Image (spheres, rainbow, N blue to C red):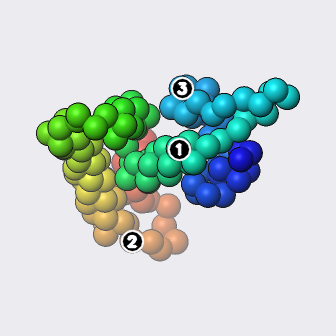
Amino acid sequence: MNISAAAERSGVPPKTIRYYEEIGLVRPLREDNGYRSFQDSDVHKLTFLGKARALGFGIDDCRALLALWEDEARTSAEVKRIANGHLSEIDTKIAGLLAMRATLAELIEHCRGDSRPDCPIIKSLEP
């Protein structure tokens, strides 16, 4: 199948598929005319990668997870280690966002929002 059909079946955009091919995550066959020829196994990989990316896994983690998925001798401990690492990153980001939200909410609370020029929000942004 061509890249458009692979994209439709996997839910991964053609541009992303080309990128995944460029970095070696997928390796579709090439026809004599040079066109990509995707097999069902390529679509399965693309679907797997699309789901992993939707969970926020980075490319390196996706590469590792894909290798583990293809390795029938894998241990779930290896997969769990990668997922736990990603969860820690998510927790760190959430903590940072919550701190940012608290700061912004406090600044908004102290801003009168009237016709006067003084504003704690602007003041906090000044060098």
Q: Determine crowd level at label 3: few under 14, some 14-19, many 20+ residues with C-alpha closer than 10 A.
A: few
Residue 15 percent across, percent down from the top left: 68, 42
- Gap between marks 3 and 1, in whole Å? 15 Å
What secondary structure is marked by label 2?
loop
Q: Which mark is residue 112?
A: 2
Which tag is nearer the camera, tag 1 or tag 2?
A: 1
Q: Is 102 above or below relative to 37? A: below
Q: Are marks 1 and 2 in contact (CB under 8 Å)?
A: no
- Gap between marks 3 and 2, in whole Å? 55 Å
Residue 75 percent across, percent down from the top left: 17, 38
- Gap between marks 1 and 2, in whole Å? 60 Å
Residue 73, visible in the rendered structure:
yes
Q: Residue under label 1, please give it.
A: 41
Amino acid residing under circle 1: Ser
Which one is in front, 36 or 116? 36
Q: Are marks 3 and 1 in contact (CB under 8 Å)?
A: no
Q: Earlier in the sequence, mark 1 or mark 2?
A: 1
Amino acid residing under circle 3: Gly
Which tag is nearer the camera, tag 3 or tag 1?
A: 1
**Residue at 70 percent of width and 38 percent of height:** 37
Residue 43 percent across, percent down from the top left: 56, 48
Q: Is 109 above or below relative to 84? A: below
Left or right? Give the position of 15 relative to 115. right
Q: Which mark is residue 24?
A: 3
